[in-house]
Amino acid sequence: MNLGSESETVEFKKSTGEHKEALQAVSAMLNKHGRGELYFGVKDDGEVVGQEVSDATLRQVTSWISDKIEPAVFPTVERLEAEEGLIYIHVEFSGLNAPYSADGRYFTRVGTSNKTLSAAELGTMIIKRDRAHSPWDSLPSGRPVADADEQAVRDFVKLGLQAGRVSDEFTNASDVLTRLGMIAPDGTLTNAAAVAFCKAPSAYPRMKLGLLAGNDKLDILDLRQEFLPLIPLLKRAEFFVVSNIRRKFVFGEPGMQRREVPEIPREAVREAIANALCHRDYATGTSVQVNVYMDFIEIVSPGLFPEGDSPERHLEGSGGDFKQRNPNIAQVLFRSGMIEQYGTGIPRIKRACDVAGVAFSYRQDVNATVIRFERTGSQVNDRGNIAVDGTTVIAANPSALEGLNEAEKTAVQIARDSGRVTKKALMEQAGVGRTKATKTLKQLAEKGVLAWVGRGTNDPYQYYRLNENA
């Protein structure tokens, strides 16, 4: 009987005599994937060879894992019988408190091997664990309760009552914050309370609002730094976007007032900004950016999606099962009626954009998540740019796009749709090899169609984007 192949979550051992190596595999799989399976009595190639398995053997295996793996893990250990009558052991385990050690040593899984964690990797894992148990927004901010803006707290209670998510009227700021659990054990405001109800320090604006004359940041028409509490900040940013894009006026029945319809759905703009403020990484100290370009709008949120999560998962409706980065800030926005259930933001944005016929995309850069709305109509085209297969692109030299081959057109399309194009993406979508993909991207950069972005030739995050320095 053959059980298949080993993997990053499956390990085979010929007998329990290899229990030390088996424990290393348990540590490695827990640290990499938070779960795994281990078999004794099975060769590396998956062939069941069996071994003597008594009740004492099962207890011994359980004891090895529960005693030698730290933090403690309590596995499921069972005796199984193959078709040939051979007896073997199956162990299943899981845990969410990484890093896990085996006999005081830490490992991670690389393919079917177990690699010792470096000091840097171990430190990162410890920080991640500590943040999971005590998220940043639950920690003391050091700011006194008196710093809370009473009007911001009043507005929150008013909105919460209207949304049916707050039951008690406003009494005073301290009482409301106590009921919300936003006063830390040391008597100061939590970070969530400081973000939601206090102005930011003058050196650290919470948001930057930009209005650009073109599709790059070379010609800035308006640039603002905002320090407001959370809900006023969200409203300010939404107003900034809506007031700086085109609107059409719709007239209803006689006597009815005209209705303004922005070219980007207002609910999609609000949801995108709320998501950026809710799920951003506040520990970076950088600002959320909301930029209105000539042909598109971008909302840049510091921080990436949690490991294993992605915008695609949210669009599929399966993105709400990950632990939130800022659960207390999310609660403020939810109870005020500014956001709905966690994990539904991106699907709601897409639904609003689909109804309005607005193109919407997202991407993750090295340290930020970007949501982009394409503005309807052609604007930059009026200044001499051209299109490839009906797709408007921005090029330093219009003649540079003449005579593109299929691989080059595919690269331009990827860059236009996703905001970037990598060798891997071009290989997959154009069906070309690595050498061809590398050559194609370099040629487009030489023609001025694409611009290379990266820290060096060995940068794993390097990519190409459309050349916007026309």
Image: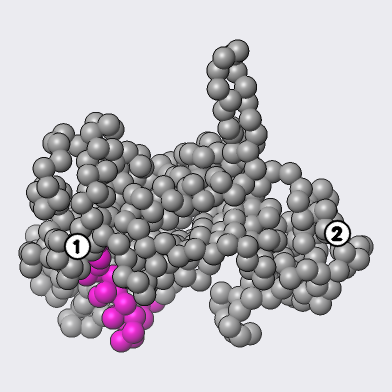
- Residue 398: x, y in percent? 87, 64
* Residue position marked by numbered label 1 in the rendering: 147
Disc 2 and disc 1 in contact, CB within 8 angstroms: no
Q: On the rendered image, what quadrant is the C terminus found in?
A: bottom right
Q: Amino acid at mark 1?
A: Asp
* Residue position marked by numbered label 2 in the rendering: 384
- Quadrant in the rendering for residue 30: bottom left
- Residue 148: x, y in percent? 20, 58
* Residue drawn at point x = 38 percent, y = 54 percent: 233
- Against 71, residue 265 (above or below) is above
The residue mark sitting in front, 2 or 1, is 1
Does residue 422 appear in this view?
Answer: no
* Residue drawn at point x = 76 percent, y = 51 percent: 379
Which class describes the residues within 10 Å of circle 2: few (<14), some (14-19), or many (20+)?
few
- Element on which disc 2 rests: loop
- Element on which disc 1 rests: helix
Q: Amino acid at mark 2?
A: Gly
- Quadrant in the rendering for residue 42: bottom left
351 drawn magenta:
no
- Residue 368: x, y in percent? 48, 66
Nearer-N-terminus badge (2/1): 1
* Residue drawn at point x = 27 percent, y = 43 percent: 155
Instruction: Report the magenta residues as a range.
Output: 112-138
**Relative to 401, 79 lies left or right:** left
